[in-house]
Image: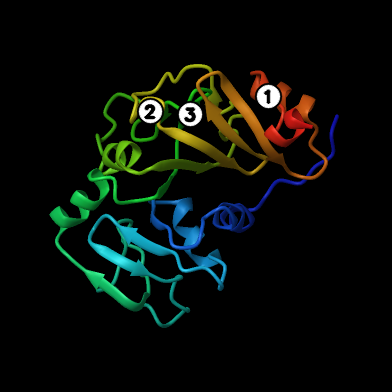
Amino acid sequence: MSSYQKRSKNELAARVAQDIFDGAYVNLGIGQPTLVGNYIPADREVVLQSENGILGMGPAPAEGQEDYDLINAGKQPVTLLAGGSFFHHADSFAMMRGGHLDICVLGAFQVSATGDLANWSTGEPGAIPAVGGAMDLAVGAKATWVMMDLLTKTGECKVVSACSYPLTGLGCVKRIYTDLCTLECTPSGLRLVDTVDGLSHAELERIVGLPIAAPAAAVAA
């Protein structure tokens, strides 16, 4: 059995931020993804968008400096960088649907090996339908990344062969960032990008219960 330490939520946010390229326009979804804005490298200009009509968000405000007239789509207080702007909700959705976002980072209940996304409902009876802008983001962004814990609280893997929950989008997820590993979704299935220290490829396949191809660099070598 491997000996490994999971990434904390902040470590996971920093891992996602590491892969966001200079000049990218990025939407950070409600929940864990909002943490990514705190870890954008200082030498990169990344423009963060929120679906309630903000462009140019900065990191979370310091404690005591919150302005609740300035909030993201999850109603969390945010900061605004120089040059940031506010606009109508309809204009925000035009950005999202029109292919103007380079990356969106979303949470998920399930992601299939080929990139199908289920992140708005577990299908429980009486659950409030609240898809929000998830469908628009999933298909409108040039790249959709998922940020989540690999396992549920009861130990089931959220990366599956086929989603059992209502779908948000088909084949839209390019990368899955989790507390144990980073995976790519391809038409032929999962490919490994990295794991936390001490977690072997074989052990990760056992946890996920699906075949995971070796990293591209390893294949090339």
Question: Secondary structure beneath disc 1?
Answer: strand
Q: Nearer the viewer, residue 120 or 17?
A: 17
Cα distance between the residues tagged 3 and 1: 17 Å
What amino acid type is highlighted by mark number 2? Thr
Mark with earlier residue (2, 3): 3
206 displayed left or right of 72: right
Pointers 3 and 1 in contact (C-beta within 8 Å): no
Cα distance between the residues tagged 2 and 3: 13 Å
Residue at the (39%, 50%) spot, across then down: 102
88 displayed left or right of 85: left
Residue at the (29%, 36%) spot, across then down: 135
Q: Nearer the viewer, residue 17 or 44?
A: 44
> Which residue is disc 2 drawn over?
122
Cα distance between the residues tagged 2 and 1: 29 Å
Image spot of residue 100 (x, y percent): 29, 51
Using the image, determine if residue 102 lies above or below residue 186.
Answer: below
Q: Residues within 10 Å of mark 3 (few under 14, many from 20)?
A: many
Using the image, determine if residue 95 lies above or below residue 43.
Answer: above
User: Which of label 3 and label 1 is nearer to you?
Assistant: 1
What amino acid type is highlighted by mark number 3? Val
> Which residue is disc 1 drawn over?
213
**Quadrant of residue 200 in the image?**
top right
Q: Which mark is residue 75?
A: none
Image spot of residue 175 (x, y percent): 53, 38
Q: Residues within 10 Å of mark 2 (few under 14, many from 20)?
A: some
**Quadrant of residue 126 in the image?**
top left
Image spot of residue 113 (x, y percent): 53, 23
**Quadrant of residue 18 in the image?**
bottom right
Question: Secondary structure beneath disc 3?
Answer: strand
What amino acid type is highlighted by mark number 1? Ala
> Which residue is disc 3 drawn over?
111
